Amino acid sequence: MGGMTESTATPGTPDATPAAPETSPRDQTLADRGSNRSQRPSSEAFRRFIAERWADRPAGTPAPLPAAPYAAARRARISALFPGERLVLPAGPLKTRSNDTDYRFRPHSAFAHLTGLGTDQEPDAVLVLHPTDDGGHEAVLYFRPLAGRDTEEFFADARYGEFWVGARPTLDDLAALTGVRTAALEELADALAKDAGEGGVRIRVVPGADDAVAAQVDEARGGTATADELAEADAALAEALSELRLTKDEYEVEQMRAAVAATIAGFERIVRNLPRAVEHRRGERVIESSFDGHAREEGNAVGYETIAASGDHATTLHWTRNDGEVRPGDLVLVDAGVEVDSLYTADVTRTLPVDGTFTDVQRRIYQAVLDAADAAFAVAKPGSRFRDLHAAAMEVIAARLAEWGLLPGTAEESLDPEGQYHRRWMVHGTSHHLGLDVHDCAQARRELYLDGVLEPGMVFTIEPGLYFKSDDLVVPEEYRGIGVRIEDDVLITEDGHENLSAALPRRPEDVEAWMARLLGR
């Protein structure tokens, strides 16, 4: 679309720009200059003609989303925490990628969680939980509904118009999908201000989700509190919404299974494309594009930027430039996850021998990481604490590094809080919660996250690693430039755990056999 010169308004401005500016070219403002590429017809004859003779839209309303009843239950849980208050959850606005083009839209995760909407639904929308007399809340979803074909938005608005981005849902459509009462976005400001202000209804808004909506909320609040008090109130809402996701309901677990299954298929595509990656000057990008293309075909997108790190690049924890070669004899660390249409994402890492077989040194390091992961799995059960996963993995990591003579003292000395020498080769944590965000529940309190007790329905990663940089003179030369991470997605069950990604081989001999089969060897 970037090179098109068809009729358009500048994306980001709701009204169409006149074809012939009233000001002279010298007087044209910077904001107006985007219209210079526009050749939109503006005659009255055209306006009448484009509004005529369109077929009726399909009758009926869509079926409710499968997530709708679960989203209603989540709203009820949040409602109970904030009786008598107005809670504002924006989906977020479209974000500019460059000049007048936008990134593909993804709604804020808290909005998605409490509405059940996914994919690119619904820019600028705002879910508001209005307090009711019985102490509960009524949910209302404010959004920009489908414009009529007799409006300029229909043909001229490149950001919202049907000609440009497709038909938007009607008020009835979105109400049927979500089970939530809907209203036009233009009604939001008055709805926020109702009974608000001094001595009125307290309003909380999800911080950072939408600056324009936050400004409307601030205006409705008036002078009810100091800026610090308001920020604290909003943070408490974000905290509660994050903690709500610490345990997944039945629908969420189903979506996580789907995301993991799609991710495993993506890793199979990567292995099949390894020969092409070896031949390409930027083989890491062959791996990245293999997975990312699969994620768009089978899901909504990737859940985060794919890491395709070959050789020494694997020792950079978040290597996403992915512009390096993929050489035979090296390992390639791939950290990737498919985000399905509901926006739940997997997060899986495998470290693969490029030519299908581990060397003795690679296998030694890989096995140490695998043993550390298995130690964390052993404590992944109800009643354990989240921090126990990391502690178990670190005991193995420290022991192996001590065996290899890399620590300045014993493993026990290294594990002491005053030591921690082993963390030179694994500076990250072993686990994080997983769900709508790849690092889910990030605003939860420490006592419920790091110090929290594992409960059925929790989903998180187990991902120890060892990373020996090429310029690390502490380690033997044969170790340098090797990075290994093994990451799986884990569900806590009533009597233990389930490795959701277990179908993707983990043991070195199984990885080699799996790769050989996929490569036809």
Image (cartoon, rainbow, N blue to C red):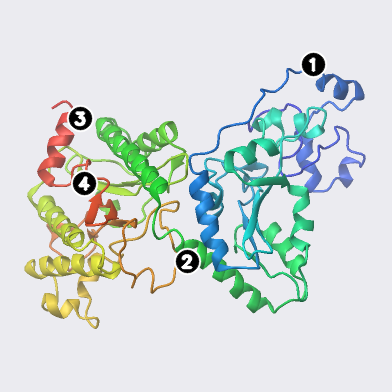
Which amino acid lies under the numbered mark 3 shown in the image of this protein? Leu
Reading the chain from its start, which is encountered first: label 1 or label 2? 1
Disc 1: which residue: 53
Residue 282 appears in the picture as rendered:
no
- Measured in 3D between alpha carbons, the distance from the residue under mark 4 to the one under mark 1, in whole angstroms, is 61 Å
* Quadrant in which the C terminus appears: top left
Compared across the picture, whether 227 is left or right of 391 comes to: right
* Quadrant in which the N terminus appears: top right
Residue 144 appears in the picture as rendered:
yes
Reading the chain from its start, which is encountered first: label 2 or label 3? 2
- Find residue 301 and report its image quarter: top left
Reading the chain from its start, which is encountered first: label 3 or label 4? 4
Disc 4: which residue: 331
Disc 3: which residue: 518
- Measured in 3D between alpha carbons, the distance from the residue under mark 3 to the one under mark 4, in whole angstroms, is 17 Å
Reading the chain from its start, which is encountered first: label 2 or label 4? 4
Which numbered mark, 2 or 4, is in the foreground of this view?
2
- Measured in 3D between alpha carbons, the distance from the residue under mark 1 to the one under mark 2, in whole angstroms, is 52 Å
Which numbered mark, 4 or 1, is in the foreground of this view?
1
Q: Position of residue 16 (x, y in %)?
A: 81, 37
What crowding class fits label 1: few (fewer than 14 Cα within 10 Å), some (14-19), or many (20 or more)? few
| Badge 1 element | loop
- Measured in 3D between alpha carbons, the distance from the residue under mark 2 to the one under mark 4, in whole angstroms, is 35 Å
Q: Position of residue 7 (x, y in %)?
A: 76, 28
| For residue 378, above or below residue 309 | below
Disc 2: which residue: 443
- Measured in 3D between alpha carbons, the distance from the residue under mark 3 to the one under mark 1, in whole angstroms, is 55 Å
Which numbered mark, 2 or 3, is in the foreground of this view?
2
Which amino acid lies under the numbered mark 4 shown in the image of this protein? Leu
